[in-house]
Amino acid sequence: MLLDLTLSGQERLFGLIGCALAFPLLLFFAFRRLGRYRLIIDTPTALIRSAPQGYVELIGQVIAGEDGMLSSPLSGRPCVWYRIRIDRYQSNRNNKGGSWRPVKRETSASWFQIDDGSGVCLVDPEGASVSTRHKKIWYGQSELPATLAGRVPFKRYAANILGTGGRYRYSEELIFQYESLYALGRFRSLGGGRDRLDLKTASADILRQWKSDQAALIGRFDTDGDGKIDQQEWQQARSLAHKEALEQQRQLDEMPTMHLICDPQTPGQPFILSTHDEKKLIRRFRWQLAGFMACALLVFWLGLELMLTPPH
């Protein structure tokens, strides 16, 4: 034994339980990081113009979506994506110490685009694991910041960090237009004649919609004026519904090709968006993997020490 421990039976038991719980949890996080590390290493970068349908890696320049630029709720800075947090410092009852309690969490869901020079791809950020180069934390006296990010005087900022200033903490992560973006997710191409309707099903849906309004249906197809739809009139309705389904297909065929990358919603295929370059992402996951493995080995060794230590 390397540690000369003096523990009661209860302390030793609690220690062993803690190690038994922590070890598999640390291994889980380590292998999760290993999986993402291997995916980034092994997945080649595709061009939007020729990317295969399915799980792909794209690298391009961010541009705003159809809704235009967003504005961060905390700093007011223009961006295409944001994630914000507001926490309030809550003192303990005895006024000795305290903790930060969440007040607000918000993540934008608006789509934006990336352009890699070969084409443009829409990005649906819902469900993505996002890491950004632009992350800021600052403090204030009210639930909403009184000043914009980057304009807080240094003395006040330092005082807040030391606990003598603001009672609120603000955290903001942003993706700006024209930043480089790494994306790993499910790639789909829509339009351009790719989408084919089941004409039979589409016709049936149109007829079902017409039948939901009997008065309009009779007014439209009751040619003999007897107040009901006979077999011949119903056949005319079916023929017209088929023509409308064909028109829907024609409109789909005329739609321009649009590309989309989104959450695969498949186990083992994470959706990753990052404004860090690929090399930095690889280093980050490598260091995280090493950290979790080192902690797992430390917990395993500590568990062995506890098992070999006789209770007192």
Image: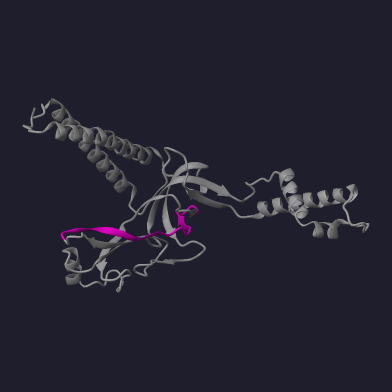
Q: Is residue 20 left or right of residue 103?
A: left
Residue 148: image quadrant is bottom left
| Picture residue at 18% right of the left edge, 35% below the top | 15
Q: Is residue 161 left or right of residue 261?
A: left
The colouring scheme, among rainbow, by chain, secondary structure or one colour, is one colour
Q: Which residues are magenta?
A: 96-121
Query: What secondary structure prevails in the magenta region?
Result: strand
**Quadrant assignment for the N terminus:** top left
| Picture residue at 26% right of the left edge, 72% below the top | 151
- The one nearer the camera, 290 or 236, is 236
Task: Decide whether residue 18 is among the magenta residues.
Answer: no
Task: Decide whether residue 112 is among the magenta residues.
Answer: yes
Residue 109 coordinates in the image, percent (x, y): 46, 58
**Quadrant assignment for the C terminus:** top left
Count of numbered badges drawn on the protein: 0
Q: Residue furthest left?
A: 4
| Picture residue at 80% right of the left edge, 56% below the top | 214
Residue 121 coordinates in the image, percent (x, y): 49, 53
Residue 264 coordinates in the image, percent (x, y): 48, 43
Residue 39 vertical placement versus 164 (above, below):
above
Residue 199: image quadrant is top right
| Picture residue at 29% right of the left edge, 43% below the top | 285
Q: Is residue 275 left or right of residue 139?
A: right
Residue 293: image quadrant is top left
Residue 35 coordinates in the image, percent (x, y): 35, 37
- The one nearer the camera, 13 or 294, is 13
